[in-house]
Amino acid sequence: MTKTASTTVRYQTRTTIDRPISDVFASLADLDGYRTWMRRTGLFRRSGQTSDGPLGLGTAYFDATRMGTFRGEVTDYQPPARIGFRETLRWFGSDLMEARPEYILEADQDKTIVHHLAEGELFGMMRLMKPVAALLARSERARTIESLRRSLESD
C-alpha cells in the first residue's frame, strides 16, 4: 500500500489463479454472483447490477458494505482481459469516498495472472480517517483476491 496524495489510498497486488482467464473474468464480471464467493467476514455484504441489459461499459451497480452502500459503474470492460469499476459512498447527500478497483488479467496456459490495483479518494470528514481507511482498504482488497482465488480453485 502506498499513499500518493493526502487523500488518496492505493493498493496493488499480483496473484496467480489456477483457472483459465475466461473463468476468472466471468467471476469478476458477475456482480450479482459476488455473494457466492465473497465471504461476509469483512466489509462486503452483497452487490448487484442496477441497470438493465448485459454487463458492459457504463453498467450501474451497488456494493453494500458495513459502512454503507456504494453506487458505481463499470469503467473498463475488455473481456477477458480487463475490468474496472468506480463507486462512491455517500452519507446524507455528501460524498465520503470513491473507490476505483481494476483487474488486469493475463493468460498463462491454464492459469491466470491477476494484477489488481485499487485506488480510493477520501472526502470531508473521512480525510481524518485516512490511516484507518488505508488499513481497511488493504485488508478488504487482499480478502477479495484471496476469496476469488479460493472459490475458483475449489471448483
Image (cartoon, grey):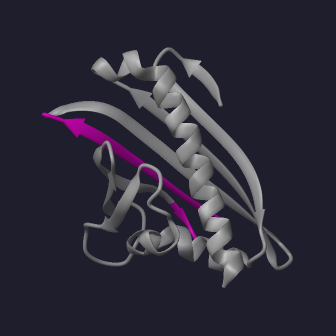
- Residue at horizontal 33 percent and vertical 47 percent from the top: 66
Along the horizontal axis of the image, is 78 left or right of 115?
A: left
- Seen as rendered, the residue at the extreme left is 92
Q: Is residue 143 above or below residue 127?
A: below
Residue in the image at 35% along x and 33% along y: 97
Q: Is residue 47 left or right of residue 85?
A: left
In this view, the residue farthest toward the bottom is 155
Quadrant of the snapshot with the N terminus: top right
Q: Main secondary structure of the magenta part?
A: strand
What residue appears at the point 41 percent right and 47 percent down from the top-left corner?
86
Q: Nearer the viewer, residue 90 or 153?
A: 153
Q: Nearer the viewer, residue 127 or 42?
A: 42
User: Which residues fall within the magenta stretch?
Assistant: 77-92
Q: Residue at x 58, y 39 (%)?
A: 138
| Vertical position of residue 97 compared to residue 128: above or below | below
Determine the residue located farthest toward the front in the rendered image: 41
Residue 10: x, y in percent? 58, 32
x, y (%) of residue 95?
25, 32
Considering every residue shown, the one lying at the far right of the view is 109
Viewer can see residue 79: yes
| Residue 80 seen in this snapshot | no
Residue 74 lies, in percent from the top left, at 41, 58
Quarter of the image for the C terminus: give it: bottom right
**The stretch drawn in magenta includes residue 79:** yes
Would you say residue 85 sits in the magenta stretch? yes
Residue 111 lies left or right of residue 61; in this view the side is right
Q: Is residue 132 above or below residue 128?
A: below
Q: Is residue 153 left or right of residue 117?
A: right
For residue 34, what is the image quadrant? bottom left
